[in-house]
Image (cartoon, helix red, strand yellow):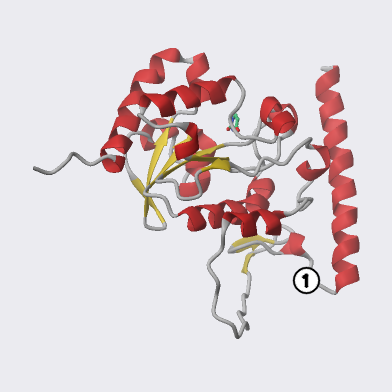
Amino acid sequence: MESLKEDIRAELLALTQSLKLQIKSDTGSGRQPSYLFVEGKVPMNNGPAVHRSFVDNRTQPRKSLSLEDVRKELGDCHRCPLGQIRTNLVFGEGNPKAEIVFVGEAPGRDEDIQGRPFVGRAGQLLTRIIIAMGLKREDVYICNILKCRPPGNRNPRPEEIMTCEPFLIKQLQTINPKVICALGTFAAHTLLKTDVPITVLRGKFHTYHGIQLMPTYHPAFLLRNPASKKQVWDDVQKIMKILLPPASH
Ligand code: URA
């Protein structure tokens, strides 16, 4: 109870500090306050949803982004209050040309400490799944919906997802894999913009901006429910068929 109170107190403090910093930097730069506008539609002050108007007045042709460019743009991110309380930002890691990207929910305690995705107990299980697929961690790319740890591993909040998602979208656009594997409810719901239960979504391919996306259970769920490993194995076998099509004779 006390540690929950501590978490809430730390989060409220971080929220206030982060808002103050953001307002200071926005008013100083004469920029449109970023907390009022995110990609697509957002309700402002609980009012009607508004569309962000985006006028692209660049004269130079668009250069294709690298993952380093995306990482640089993210910088020492304090766009949401989680930036104030993280130990390390967890950008993602792996092969920038991976054919498969695994997307999880958010860094946990171990990931926050190490600055790397999926390195705790759930991460070790994910590594075993990757090896069982005949791949190595270095072959694939692993990242999360959120780049910073929510306190006490609570669920990501909609405003945190909205703030972080543009960077995930750029990572996925840059890597342009053959398959995305969405690990768990949050990844599947965020990427597919649905709230259909993961039990229904999993096991079938969906499309994410032209890329095939397979939702499956999160490895942390498997640690609590080992009987569901069989279903995850079925799901990853479907992915393997796409990654390694049978040799033609
Ligand atoms: N759970 C996640 O969703 N992501 C991690 O990086 C670790 C645990």
User: Ligand 1 shows up in which quadrant of the image?
Assistant: top right
Q: Residue at x 87, y 61 (%)?
A: 23
Left or right of 207 on screen, residue 63: right
Viewer-side residue, 91 vs 158 = 91
In the rendered image, the vertical position of residue 132 relative to residue 183, given as above or below: above
Viewer-side residue, 20 vs 99 = 99
**Residue 33 location (% of width, % of height):** 79, 66
**Residue 223 location (% of width, % of height):** 51, 16
Badge 1 amino acid: Gln
Name which quarter of the figure residue 248 lies in: top left
Q: Quadrant of the N terminus?
A: top right
Q: Residue at x 41, y 26 (%)?
A: 131
Q: Secondary structure at mark 1?
A: loop
Viewer-side residue, 155 vs 246 = 246
Residue 193 visible in the picture: no
In the rendered image, the vertical position of residue 217 relative to residue 180, given as above or below: above
Q: Residue at x 58, y 19 (%)?
A: 121
Q: Residue at x 68, y 30 (%)?
A: 154
**Residue 144 location (% of width, % of height):** 58, 40
Q: Residues within 10 Å of mark 1 (few under 14, many from 20)?
A: few
Residue that carries the numbered disc 1 in the rendered image: 32
Name which quarter of the figure residue 15 lies in: top right
Left or right of 120 on screen, residue 78: right
**Residue 178 location (% of width, % of height):** 36, 49
Name which quarter of the figure residue 4 lies in: top right
In this view, the residue farthest toward the left is: 249
Mark 1 C-beta closer than 8 Å to ligand 1: no
Left or right of 85 on screen, residue 69: left
